[in-house]
Image (cartoon, rainbow, N blue to C red):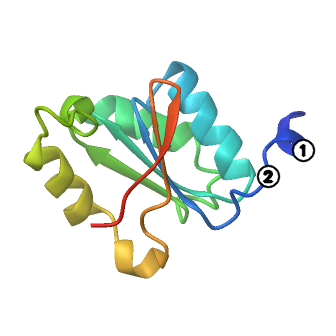
Amino acid sequence: MTDNISDVTGFHDRVVLITGGTSGMGLATARLLLEAGAHIVITGRDDARLDRAAEQLDEVSDHGARLFTVRADSAGLFDAANPDPASHDAIRSQVPLGRLGRARDIAVDGGLVTAVPAS
């Protein structure tokens, strides 16, 4: 567990979508929020990097029970002018949203945290 866990509250059982969660700040954010009890969805374009990220987060994600990896180009997820339906469909088809209950909570894109609107 990180020393900063006391600074992260209110994420237990929340669902967080982290684009670019396979490395760097995205991966670190995924780890921190998993430690706080969140369910995490990370997106990436490369299966090998997604697999490596899942391996690195295995223990802190209850051996994958709270981590979902989705191969998708997230460029269009937050672009209101040019949305990418294929990326949205990839997430919907690969993440068991019904099992998670509150399926749309928070999204992290390049360090920007926003609420995800219900559809």
Based on the displayed image, in which of its 4 quarters is residue 92 positioned?
Answer: bottom left
* Disc 1 packing (10 Å; few <14; some 14–19; many ≥20): few
Residue nearest the viewer, comparing 111 with 3? 111
Percent of width and height locating residue 49: 36, 29
Q: Which residue is mark 2?
A: 9
Percent of width and height locating residue 14: 59, 63
Q: Residue at x 68, y 57 (%)?
A: 11
Percent of width and height locating residue 32: 70, 40
Q: Amino acid at mark 2?
A: Thr
Q: Which residue is mark 1?
A: 6
Quarter holding the N terminus?
top right
In-image side of 55 versus 68 (left or right): right
Q: Is residue 112 above or below residue 72?
A: above
Q: How many marks?
A: 2
Percent of width and height locating residue 17: 44, 48
Q: Is residue 45 visible?
A: no
Mark 1 falls on what kind of element?
Answer: helix
Q: Amino acid at mark 1?
A: Ser
Based on the displayed image, in which of its 4 quarters is residue 79 positioned?
Answer: top left
In-image side of 94 versus 36 (left or right): left
In-image side of 119 versus 8 (left or right): left
Based on the displayed image, in which of its 4 quarters is residue 12 positioned?
Answer: bottom right
